[in-house]
Image (cartoon, rainbow, N blue to C red):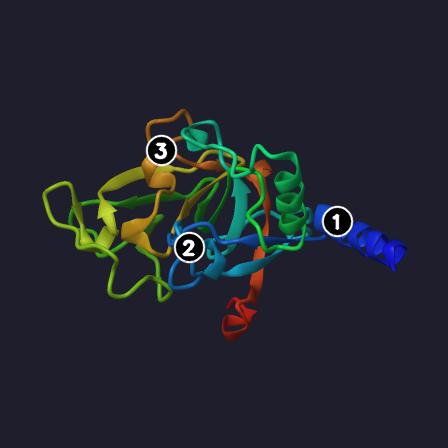
Amino acid sequence: MLVTAVVSFGVLAGVQAFVGRFYVVPSSSMEPTLQGCTDCPESNDRIVVDKLAYRFGDPQPGDVAVFDGTESWRSGFSSPRSNNRFLRGVQNVGSAIGVVAPDANSFVKRVIAIEGQTVQCMPGDPGVLVDGRVIAEPYLADPPAHRVDGPGGAQECGGDYFGPVTVPQGHVWVMGDNRTNSLDSRAYLGDLQQGTVPVDNFIGKVRGIFLPLDRFGGLE
């Protein structure tokens, strides 16, 4: 029995290292597509991430993806692991089967624009524009989590005005579906890459939700 358990865990760890990974959605920034709660992680969506997707191709507009943050995205990150060795081991096992968040500063967002494309939402724009055309975003939280009032932004932008930003080679621009409650590329416009994320930082594409069972299913 013990040998079987060890072998099974080893196989699962291997699959998660090279093929797919289970993740816990850490926040509400991707609602309603993915449900999350910073203070109640036990009820958050558990998602299946395809790690092969970006070994044979790059992230594309519309993809919901998991990635590691750049240096500017990592500010304020602290490990969720316990200082107790036993509890830390239990947490690591839980992470391997997707019931505990990984010990990493990983994010899940939607890809909006890729290298060479120009993204913006400026005064008078009817929504987020990519290469001058408003993009259809039926996945956005409606009604929005927060009203946007004031001269610096608009409801159509889901927050402050931004852009235009031309995405550098090998990078992508990402945003959360819960647009008025998401820290995403817009929040890091002041860094060297204007908030964009290197393609090499992407871990995989979200394929679906496996827990809770009443939300089980694939992402469109």
Q: Position of residue 138 (x, y in %)?
A: 35, 67
* Quadrant placement of the N terminus: bottom right
In the structure shown, which secondary structural element does the residue marked by tag 3 occupy?
Answer: helix
Tags 1 and 3 in contact by the CB under 8 Å rule? no
Tell me the distance, in whole angstroms, between the alpha carbons under discs 1 and 3.
Answer: 33 Å
Q: Judging from the image, what secondary structure is the residue with disc 1 in? A: helix
Residue 139 tag number: none
Determine the CA span between mark 2 and mark 1: 26 Å
Which residue position is annotated with label 2? Answer: 40
- Name the amino acid type tagged 1: Ala
In this view of the protein, can residue 132 be seen by the observer? no
Structural crowding at the residue carrying mark 1, measured as other residues with C-alpha within 10 Å and reported as few (<14), some (14–19) or many (≥20) = some
15 to 120, vertically: above or below: below
Mark toward the start of the polypeptide (2 vs 3): 2
Residue on which disc 1 sits: 13
Residue in the picture at 46% in, 34% down: 168
Residue type of the residue flagged with mark 2: Cys
Which callout, 2 or 1, points at the residue further toward the start of the chain? 1
The image position of residue 195, as x and y in percent, is 39, 35
Q: Which residue is mark 3?
A: 188
Element under label 2? loop
Judged left or right of residue 36, residue 94 is: right
Amino acid residing under circle 3: Tyr
Neighbours of disc 3 within 10 Å: few (<14), some (14-19), many (20+): some
Is residue 99 or residue 184 the one in the foreground? 99
Residue 142 location, x and y as percent?
27, 66
